[in-house]
Structures are given as C-alpha cells and as structure tokens.
Image: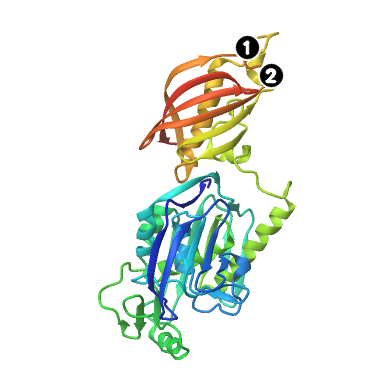
Amino acid sequence: MVRQQRTIKKSFKYDGIGLHTGKQVSTEVKPAPLDNGIVFKRIDLDPPVEIPANVDHIHQEEIRRNTTITKDGVDVHTVEHFLATAAGLHVDNLIVEIDSDEPPEPKDGSCLSLVGAFNSVGFEGQGVPTRSFKVKSPISHVENDIELIALPHDGFRVSFTIDYENPHIGTQYASYELDPEVFVNEIAPSRTFALKSDVEMLRSEGLIKGGSLDNAIVVDDNGLLNKGPLRFEDEFVRHKILDIIGDLNLIGNPIEAHVIAIRSGHQSNLRFAKKIGDVIKQSRRSAAGGRDKFWDINVIQRIMPHRYPFLLVDRILEMEDKKSVVGLKNITINEPFFSGHFPGRPIMPAVLIIEAMAQVGGILLLSSVDKPEKYLVYFIGIDKAKFRRPVVPGDQVRFELEMTSLKKRFCKMKGMAYVDGKVVAEAELTSTIVNR
C-alpha cells in the first residue's frame, strides 16, 4: 500500500452546529506541508493554540461517546467524523482552523457533506510516500467483552461486529477493504446512531445539545424514531467502522493491517490506537538510521514490478505530483549487461539508458494513482531519442523527467539523463497504465 502524501488544493470553509455543545461553529480547512499531519487550530483563543490530531494528544479523561484531543489544557471535542473523512479520502496533511471547542457535526450525522466539501476543492499529491506502518505480527487489545486486533495484511481492511440487546439493532457484522471509493460509497453515508435511553441520559449531563433526529438515528424498543428507512440494512455497524477509521487516524500513519473489532467504542478504539502508536515508535527507534527514507529501493520495489536484472532505478530524489520526477541509477561493473557489451570496454547499452529513464517516469505515473501495486506502466512510444556520451562503470546517472501531457491513463514525458552535470541522453516517452 504505497501512495503519496496528500493535502487539498485550496482551502474550504465548513460551518454548522457542534453536536455536544450546540454552538454555532465555523471552520476553515487549509492545505498543509509534508509530514504536518492533521492539526486543529483554536483561533478563538489569544494566542491561537494548535493541537495535533495524534495519539500523544488524546484526552484521557474525555473518552466517552466522542473523541477529544487536548494540548496544554485546551481541547477540541468530537473530531472522529472529520478524521474519518480525511483518512477515508487519503488526505494526510491539513490545518483545521476552528473558532470553538468542537467542529460542526455533519448535517445528517454522516460524512457525506464533508466528503462533498473535500471533493469541491480537490486533492494535491505532495511528492513523497506516506510513512505507512505495516503490521507484521498481531497487535491486540481486550477489555471485558470488547476485543480489537490488528493482523498482518496487504492493504487496510476493517471487520466489525456489534451486539445490542435492542432487537432493531441486534448483532451485525461487516467487513470492508478500504480505499477512497469504498469509503465514499459504503461507509461515509452511514449515520450516527443512539438508543433513546442513552439520548435522555446524555442530555441530562448537558451533552448532545446540537443533536436531533436530523443528524442522528435514534432507536427505542419500538424501532426508529426517525422518518424514512435506514440507508443500509447494516447501517449501524457501518457507522461503527466509520468511527474506528477516524479514531485510528490518530495513530498518525496509515497502517497496513486487517483490523478486527468486536463491540468496540471510542474508549477502546483510542486505547488500541495508542497501543499501535507505541509499537510504531518502538519500531522506528530500533530501525537503522532512526528515520524513514523516502523513495528508497524498498519503496520503489513496492511500486514497480521489475526485479533483477531489470530494475534500473536505485532512488527517487524529487517528485512533484503529475509534473516532474528526478531519479538515480548507480552504474557498477557488476551490471550483467557489461559481460557482453562490450568485453574489455564496458558501455551501458543506449536502450537500457532509455529503459531506466522510462522506469523513473513510470514511478511518477504510478504514484499518482491509488494502489499503484495493482497497475503496470506500458511504454507505447519513444521519440527524439539522442545519445550524447557513453555511460560506463562508476557513473551515477541522474534522470530528470517532466510530464508534458496527462489524459486519463495516457501521458507524455520529456526526459533528460545526466552524468556529472553533462547530458548523456534525452528522449520523449509516451506511456499508459494498465491493470496487472
């Protein structure tokens, strides 16, 4: 599961009523730089306070029917739906300016209006891969009859079981392999729900002042109090999946795992998220170098299908989404083609210089799609190829490609190859993406 970090192309405003406070709230969601994560900024305070949405800022005393983050005694409540939408749409870096202590509750209790707001401004790839965490051994959390476990998995799947005594909810199970399309169509439309007895209890405690039958499903012993049918027969468990997507977003990294949850709620979700976060911190402390390397050979091999002796890219240095890419190939005497090209005078075949250039361009093209490991790049045209100097053992070839045209799955790129700052080759390449 390799993809670029993403933000939004431009800011958007999102206003409404806080679910628990009942206050009128205004938010402005802004693009943010690489590795920023999602940060809520309380602009109603002087000076404003920024609260990163991660496990280090979970409010341990405010975990009940919502998810609260905190910093220096300043809180933002009920962030789970916003975080679920960002995670579901693969948006990693945002600044959320808010003039209250709770973001607006989505208008119908689902995430559809938030999805629409994000889609209205579009998304921007940021040129480097997400710092995803691949679960390699089970991570579990158990509280009485609540169970959560993350199992090794190629991708991100959530399986959830709920079990209510109320016969109109009962026992429900759902399991989804999640990507933006699945999130938008299957998860985002599901609405917040509550038992009528819980609603009465929460109101007596001064909560859900902004709650109504317009933004939540309410159920009693006789059935739904809302007008109209459920959106899905299993809408209740789908919303539980939505909630856990938001809560696990606080880990701060996309995870590759199959998450199985039984009877879980925000409290247990957040304890589970913190446990996974601790595992990630420990794994990075013990990793060589102490930090991730972006677009190194390990990431490249997860995108590209090529292997020895035909993988001809060692590293990606720079990338601007759907615009340009810079990559390196180190040339050693151990390259297999030197044994025959030519004995006694090793020279890299010109066609392989173009192939290496094409592979660098292929990484740019594949990194612009979700789940790039499911696609191949076919090069369907090479024009204006010129070779200026021979490439020999000991050279480091720097490839610079600019995307000059992109239409659906077809693109054109102009490529240059340099050794020690001097041009060794150039070409114009045409390619397309196909399913593997």
Q: How many numbered tags mark residues here?
A: 2
> Residue at horizontal 44%, vertical 55%?
89
* Disc 1: CA contacts within 10 A as few (<14), some (14-19) or many (>=20): few
| 196, above or below 320, in the image | below
Q: Position of residue 25 (x, y in %)?
A: 41, 73
Residue 240 numbered tag: none
- Whether residue 422 appears in this view of the structure is yes
Residue sitting at the far bottom? 204
Q: Which residue is at a point 61% across and 66% down the rendered structure image?
A: 55
Are there few (<14), some (14-19), or many (20+) residues within 10 Å of tag 2?
A: some
Q: Whole-percent x and y of residue 160?
A: 47, 66
Q: Residue at x 45, y 48 (%)?
A: 124
Q: Visible in this render: residue 147?
A: no
Left or right, 201 with respect to 72, comes to left
> Closer to the camera, 257 or 331?
331
Q: Residue 125: x, y in percent?
A: 48, 46
Q: Secondary structure at mark 2?
A: loop
**Distance from the alpha carbon under mark 2 to that under mark 1:** 12 Å
Viewed as shown, does residue 244 lie left or right of 280?
left
Numbered disc in front, either 2 or 1: 2
Read off the residue under disc 2.
Answer: 393
> Is mark 2 in CB contact (under 8 Å) with mark 1?
no
Task: Name the residue tied to disc 1.
Answer: 341
Taking depth in this image into account, of 133 and 16 the one nearest to the observer is: 16
Q: Is residue 11 left or right of residue 53?
A: left
Residue at x 39% of width, y 66% of height: 14
Which element carries disc 1, helix, strand or loop? loop
Identify which amino acid the numbered label 1 is placed on: His
Choose top left, top right, bottom left or bottom right for residue 196: bottom left
Tell me which label, 2 or 1, sits earlier in the chain: 1
Amino acid beneath label 2 = Pro
User: Can you tell which quarter of the image residue 106 is in?
Assistant: bottom left
